Amino acid sequence: MKKLRVRYSQPINSDTFEVSPPAQAPQGVLVDAILVTSEICGQTLSAAAARILAGDLADFDETAILGALSRCRMEVQGRLKVSDIVVRIADGRPDAEEAWDMLPRDETASIVWTEEMARAWGLALPLLEAGDVGAARIVFGDNYARAVQQSRMRREPVRWMPSLGSDVKAREAAVLEAVRKGRLTVTQASALLPPGDLLPVAANDAPARARKLH
């Protein structure tokens, strides 16, 4: 396997990221959902314990919490913990399998990835360079999942960053895809691409922006 260098993402001003304030879930709704989920997982909680858990989760978006609890009911066995819920919150970060599939395979490839992906990739890279893809995948998955859980526990929003390879066309494709998926703004992408490359994306976004005004 061709030796890869650890590539550091090009910096983007964090002030350009707009983080919407989380919606507050009514305590009664969360408490009831936690009580039901805990019972299905195999252990009954007291109402007082459920209220404490609900308070710990109050900073997260209501829909995301309830979605995470739904996953817990299918995946968790035994005592329900805050970490079980937090790690399953949908906050824009890809799961470990999707994140692995997104990773660059050589220095020509470009990617727009999260901080957690970049850190886990650096730990898995020596194994990839040694040709042990299976072990690299395990190391990446374990470290990525741990980093994601820590970021969510610290209430850190997902942050997408570009890591650009040498293939110019692949670089443009990666950046434009990130804009379409809302991972980069047009302003952020314009600093990475030649003038004019963002015109098709801007044109496609114009009708959506117009609808929001009516």
Image: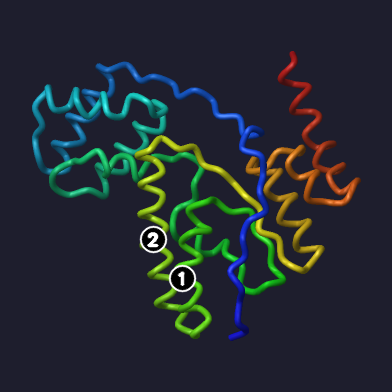
Q: CA distance from mark 2 to mark 1?
A: 9 Å
Q: Residue at x 49, y 46 (%)?
A: 93
Q: Position of residue 94 (x, y in %)?
A: 49, 51
The residue at which mark 2 appears reads as 143
Does label 2 or label 1 sit earlier along the sequence? 1
Q: Residue at x 8, y 27 (%)?
A: 46
Badge 1 density bin: few <14, some 14–19, many ≥20, Cα 10 Å: many
Closer to the camera in the image, 52 or 208:
52
Closer to the camera in the image, 32 or 95:
95
Is 20 situated left or right of 84 in this image? right
Q: Quadrant of the C terminus?
A: top right
Q: How is the image coloured?
A: rainbow
Badge 2 density bin: few <14, some 14–19, many ≥20, Cα 10 Å: some
Q: Residue 164 falls in which quadrant of the image?
A: bottom right
Residue type at mark 1 is Ala
Q: Position of residue 109 (x, y in %)?
A: 69, 67
Q: Position of residue 45 (x, y in %)?
A: 10, 31
Is 56 situated above or below 114? above
Q: Residue 44 falls in which quadrant of the image?
A: top left
Q: Position of residue 90 (x, y in %)?
A: 44, 40
- Asked if marks 2 and 1 touch (Cβ < 8 Å), the reply is yes
Closer to the camera in the image, 105 or 205:
105
**Which mark is on residue 95?**
none
**Which mark is on residue 124?**
1
